[in-house]
Image (spheres, rainbow, N blue to C red):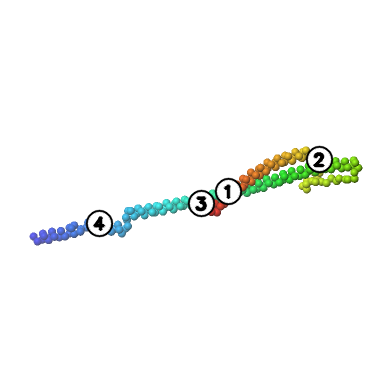
Amino acid sequence: MFDDDDDNDEEEVSGPASGGYGSATDDDDDEDEEEDGTDPETERRADAEVARGKNDRAFYDNLAKEEDARHNAMRVDLQKRSLAVGELRQKLHHKESELRELSMKITIEEDRIDYEKKKAYRRGVGDIADTVGGQTHIESTPILSKDIDPKDIDEEFSVERAEAHIKQMKSEKIELEEVLRDMLEHMHKEERALSQLQHQLIRM
C-alpha cells in the first residue's frame, strides 16, 4: 500500500500544476521576439522609411536633371540669340552704309545742278556785260562738291534728268530709312531678350 501512494505523489509533483513545459516554452518565445527585434509594426515602419527615402532621392534627382536640361536649353538659346543679334548688327551696318552712299549721291547731284544753273546764269551776265562794253568781267567759279569727279564737268549734263534722278534717289532713301527703322527696332528687341536671358542664367 505504501508503494502506491509514493507513485501518486511522484505523478502529482511532475504534473502541469508545477509549472510544466508549456509555460516555459511561451516564455522562451517572448524572449526570442524581444532579442531579435522582429516586431511586425517596427519592420513595417522601417521599410516605409527606406521606401520614402528612395522616393525622395529619385524626386530630387529628377529635379536636378530637369534643371540641368533647362540650363542647357537656355545656354543654347543664348548662343543662337547672340549670333542672331550679331547678324542683325552686320545687316544694319550694311544698310546704314547704303543710306550714307545714297545721301552722298543726292548731295553730289544737287551740287552739280546748282553749279550748272549758276554757270549758265553767269555766262548770261557775262554776255550782257560784253554787249554793253562794260569793264566788269565775271569769272565762272566752280561750286562743285569736292566729291564730284572733275572729268564729269565736260560731259553733257541735263538739269531735268538730274532732277528726275534726285527725285528717284530721294524716294529710295525714304524706303531705305523705313527699312532701317524696322531693322533697328527688331535688333533692339532681340538685344533686350538677350540681356534678360543673360541675367536669368547669372541668377541661376
**Residue 32 location in percent, x, y?**
29, 58
Q: Earlier in the sequence, mark 4 or mark 3?
A: 4
What's the residue type where badge 3 is placed?
A: Asp
Q: Earlier in the sequence, mark 1 or mark 2?
A: 2
Label 3 belongs to which residue? 68
Label 1 and label 2: CA atoms lie apart by: 55 Å
Residue at 9%, 61% (x, y): give it.
2
Q: In the picture, residue 186 is in which quadrant?
A: top right
Please provide percent x and percent y for residue 113. 78, 42
Instruction: Point out the tag, 4 or 2, that comes first from the N-terminus.
Output: 4
Q: Which residue is mark 4?
A: 26
| Residue position marked by numbered label 2 in the rendering | 156
Q: Which residue is mark 1?
A: 193
Residue drawn at (81%, 41%), measured in percent from left and top?
117
Q: Residue furthest right?
A: 133
Disc 2: CA contacts within 10 A as few (<14), some (14-19) or many (>=20): few
Residue nearest the observer in this picture, 145 or 152: 145
Q: Residue furthest left?
A: 1
Task: For label 1, count other residues whose C-alpha is less than 10 Å away and answer few (under 14), some (14-19) or many (20+).
Answer: few
Q: CA distance from mark 4 to mark 2?
A: 132 Å
Q: Is residue 143 left or right of residue 61?
A: right
Amino acid at the residue labelled 2: Glu
Q: Would you identify the image quadrant in which residue 115 lies?
A: top right
